[in-house]
Image (tube, rainbow, N blue to C red):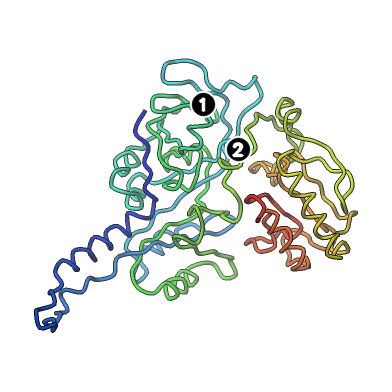
Amino acid sequence: MRRRLVVPAVLVLLIGAAAGALGALALQPQVGRAGHPPPVTPAAVPEPGPRVLLVWTHAGLPAGLAAAVGHLAGVQAVTPVAGGEVDMTGSTAGDGRPADHPPPGWSIPLDTAAVDPATYPAFVPPGARELVGSLAPGRVLLGTTSAGLRRLGTGAVLDLAGRQLNVAGVVDDVLVGAAEAVVSAEEGRALGLRERYLLVAYTGDRAGLEALIRGVLPAGLAVRFRGPGETPFLREGDAVLPQALVKARFGEFAYRRGLGSDIVVDPAFEAENVVADTVPLLGRVRCHRAVLPALRGAMDELGARGLATLVDANGFGGCYVPRTIARGESLSRHAWGVAFDLNTGKNPTGLTGVQDPRLIAVMRRWGFTSGASWLVPDPSHFEYLRPPEG
């Protein structure tokens, strides 16, 4: 297997700046014996290196946005990243043994990204550029978490939506926004993936660049900007765990589609992981066994603090509800039983909600993120993000 890369994706753009700074330090005049340093010339002060900005819009990027952003002042490089969920119907290891083999009519959902092999390498460390640049139709990279789940590496073959793709290598999750599989932009178009976000290398003022980008977006289109260190992975929808990490924490399953947005989950996964129990304030619920203690703990805290009225038992929208987010779209975290809806009657999707901030704070303390602040608000929605505090 190709040696896995562990340097953060955007670090390559910071490494150059750091190297320049170190070089400049070597050129700095030393303090003399009398304690008076000679004057520093302007040439010894390094220019600031490029920084990285993620640009994300919920419904996919407007046509031509990458080209428009590329012409803005201060922009050094731009690359669009497409993404979506692709059904994997099987996989084979490099030695020919079957790895994933769901029954006919069933598949395993893979969070898949598509990148431009000509422009994306500028946003990864030098050691990964050749591998990413080699992406072409018929080839796929695996993120480290996905490769671990699959127990696959270089030379394996994935059957994605009926297309046989050869695994060209394994890269660290952070280099590819924690995607499970990464294909070329051309392959992504064949798989029906939509452009989801831009990575932009720039110099100068970030606020000014954000204003310029808003100026080339359609009026009223909601946009989110992120920089390194503001989120664990530079990707769209970063308020929730990437699907690869959901699988690593809660398990992976095969599924088949039902009517509308309904799906059928592998009965073995459901039997092993989904449990029913009575939870204070909510009554009988069905959730993944791993999140049930945190959900119960949050409801207990609300009751103990005299905040039980913040939860309407009749507004509980369920926890384990096997379905997609919308008809034909990616799987909802409800399909794992790690998300639930509270006070649905007063907090419809797409509108600003009226959830009490004290409720949101308690849920956050117990490890759940709220959809109230999403680009398209889903204020009744709470979803596992991290272990409970303290």
Q: Is residue 214 positioned above or below 336 on the image?
A: below
The N terminus sits in image quarter: top left
In the image, 150 versus 37, the foreground residue is 37
Of tags 1 and 2, the one toward the viewer is 2
What residue sits right under mark 2 in the picture? 247
Task: Count residues near mark 1 (Cα–Cα under 10 Å), then give few for <14, some for 14-19, many for 20+.
Answer: some
Judged from the image, the secondary structure of the residue bearing numbered disc 2 is helix
Horizontally, residue 251 falls left or right of residue 322, namely left
Locate residue 90: give its quadrant.
top right
Q: Give the percent coordinates (x, y) of residue 220.
A: 60, 70
Locate residue 204: give its quadrant.
bottom left
Q: Give the percent coordinates (x, y) of residue 53.
A: 43, 62
Q: Is residue 40 positioned above or below 19 on the image?
A: below
Q: CA distance from mark 1 to mark 2?
A: 19 Å
Taking the spot 57% from the left edge, 42% from the top edge, the residue there is 245
Judged from the image, the secondary structure of the residue bearing numbered disc 1 is strand
Horizontally, residue 303 falls left or right of residue 388, namely right
Locate residue 88: give its quadrant.
top right
What residue sits right under mark 1 in the picture? 159
Which residue is at the far front?
33
Q: Give the percent coordinates (x, y) of residue 49.
A: 29, 66
Q: Which mark is residue 86?
A: none
Horizontally, residue 24 falls left or right of residue 188, namely left
In the image, 211 versus 296, the foreground residue is 296
Taking the spot 78% from the left edge, 60% from the top edge, the residue there is 348
Taking the spot 85% from the left edge, 47% from the top edge, the residue there is 279
Specify the amino acid type for callout 2.
Lys
Specify the amino acid type for callout 1.
Asp
Q: Give the percent coordinates (x, y) of residue 208.
A: 43, 76
